[in-house]
Image: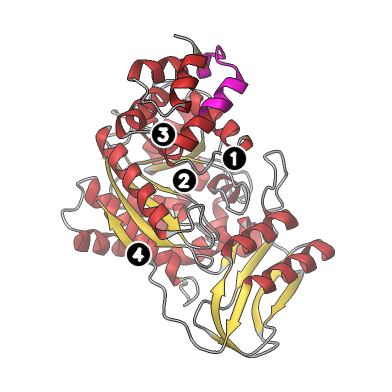
């Protein structure tokens, strides 16, 4: 076999065999397939798609390109969740201690923010000292001690995905559903999971903005996960506005710790509600609970009793962070008092929000990455004070931008003001959870 023959076959709309896909992925991993050949193949897949059989074969080949973790010594079901990303999407910081305190084990391999979306690893690194570069032995030890561990993708886990993902970004093939599925499921299966809940975002702040696109992705993810022996279920959830109030690394950690402490407001309640729902579904998939109702009750119990907060504290300490962040988050986290008000230009109701633009504004101000190599200022943030459907008067606050840099803060405030559409009539309420995909 030759790489160019495989590229040509997919370019012409043919179906690749399992052997051809394994050969190509092996060449990606070893370096025998050149980057320009990988790029051509990615575009051929983007344009022509893949059958279910091709998608499963690609996922398996990427999974077996590296090490598959084994946590059999930990006698608990292994579960995780994946989100396709959005603005203010911080549920991982709640879900992990929720399911761990409820008796599951969560080996979470997380990513960093790029573009308009935030990354779990960047949020965690806002906690002074917190390590997200654990060795596999350290990762396993933390998992055994705390019930969950959060780490970046190591060189041993799905190495083919690391190369393919970097080139997908460079070749504008990020949105190809077969490539998304193979990337996500290969990494999750490499973590030795028994079950997985998948949160597929839809709306103005999602990668998949259209509902039908999101539905196709959700079905493909759940189907592929189940076909590989990981009990999987997907939810399609709203991303037409920031999830909760906080957008930015330190403030998102602050919001989650406040929620774990039972300090819930109307603006932050959607984060808690979605986290409870996803965590409950993980317990059912893991066969810890037999019904979604009993699973929700169990998650609410570990939340309200403080068990989840204590679990989070143990993890922070185990991953070398400052555990005082659970008691004095405003003092321990890097925050700034320098603020810039985002005013409503007119009276009326919030009818639409361009969540993606808010994410880009915060990233450009230093709170995220425009390029992979960019440094992040964890203090840069936006706190939304209004949600879709809220009434506002001209000159009243939509929210507040935080930035130590005057010019960056003012520019972000202008961009975010333009991201809010104020109309004369109150719009219909948005459903947070739009659909469940079995």
Q: Nearer the viewer, mark 3 or mark 1?
A: 1
Task: Identify the residue at image location x=72%, y=52%.
Answer: 377
Which mark sits nearer the N-terminus, 2 or 3? 3
* C-alpha distance separating marks 3 and 1: 17 Å
Q: CA distance from mark 4 to mark 3?
A: 24 Å
Q: Is residue 306 visible?
A: no
Q: How dense is the environment of label 1, judged by Cα within 10 Å: few (below 14), some, or many (20 and up)?
A: few
Q: Is residue 290 above or below residue 134?
A: below
Mark 2 and mark 4: Cα distance apart in space: 32 Å
The image shows residue 338 at horizontal and vertical percentages of: 77, 69
Establish if 392 lies above or below 398.
below
Residue under pointer 3: 182
**First reached walking from the N terminus: tag 2 or tag 4:** 2
Instruction: Check disc 4 and report the residue beneath it.
Output: 434
Furthest residue in direction right, as rendered: 407
Q: Nearer the viewer, residue 272 or 163?
A: 163
Q: CA distance from mark 2 to mark 3?
A: 29 Å
Q: Which mark is residue 172?
A: 1
> From this viewpoint, which residue is outermost toward the left?
290
């Amino acid at each position: 076999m030759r790489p160019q023959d495989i590229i040509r076959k997919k370019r012409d709309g043919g179906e690749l065999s399992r052997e051809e896909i394994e050969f190509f992925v092996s060449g990606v991993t070893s370096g025998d397939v050149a980057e320009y050949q990988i790029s051509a193949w990615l575009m051929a897949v983007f344009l022509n798609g893949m059958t279910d059989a091709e998608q499963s074969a690609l996922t398996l080949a990427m999974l077996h390109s590296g090490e598959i973790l084994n946590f059999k010594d930990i006698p608990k079901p292994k579960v995780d969740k994946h989100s396709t990303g959005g603005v203010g999407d911080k549920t991982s910081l709640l879900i992990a201690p929720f399911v761990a305190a409820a008796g599951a084990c969560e080996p979470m391999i997380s990513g960093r923010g790029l573009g308009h979306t935030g990354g779990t690893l960047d949020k965690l690194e806002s906690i002074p000292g917190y390590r997200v570069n654990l060795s596999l032995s350290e990762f396993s030890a933390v998992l055994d001690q705390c019930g969950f561990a959060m780490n970046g993708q190591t060189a041993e886990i799905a190495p083919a995905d690391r190369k393919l993902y970097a080139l997908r970004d460079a070749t504008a093939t990020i949105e190809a559903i077969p490539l998304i599925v193979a990337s996500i499921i290969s990494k999750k299966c490499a973590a030795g999971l028994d079950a997985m809940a998948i949160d597929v975002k839809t709306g103005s702040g999602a990668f998949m903005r259209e509902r039908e696109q999101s539905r196709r992705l959700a079905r493909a993810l759940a189907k592929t996960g189940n076909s590989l022996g990981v009990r999987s279920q997907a939810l399609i959830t709203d991303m037409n506005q920031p999830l909760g109030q906080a957008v930015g690394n330190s403030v998102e950690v602050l919001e989650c710790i406040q929620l774990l402490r039972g300090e819930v407001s109307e603006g932050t309640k959607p984060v808690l509600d979605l986290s409870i729902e996803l965590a409950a579904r993980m317990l059912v998939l893991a066969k810890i609970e037999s019904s979604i109702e009993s699973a929700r009750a169990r998650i609410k119990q570990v939340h309200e009793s403080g068990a989840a907060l204590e679990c989070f504290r143990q993890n922070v300490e185990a991953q070398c962070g400052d555990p005082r962040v659970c008691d004095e988050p405003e003092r321990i986290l890097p925050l700034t008092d320098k603020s810039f008000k985002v005013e409503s230009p007119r009276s009326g109701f919030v009818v639409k929000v361009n969540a993606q633009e808010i994410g880009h504004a915060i990233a450009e101000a230093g709170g995220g990455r425009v390029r992979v190599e960019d440094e992040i200022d964890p203090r840069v943030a936006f706190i939304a004070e209004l949600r879709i459907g809220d009434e506002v008067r001209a000159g009243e606050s939509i929210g507040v931008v935080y930035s130590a840099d005057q010019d960056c803060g003012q520019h972000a405030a202008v961009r975010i003001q333009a991201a809010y559409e104020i109309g004369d009539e109150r719009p219909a309420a948005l459903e947070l959870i739009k659909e469940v995909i079995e």
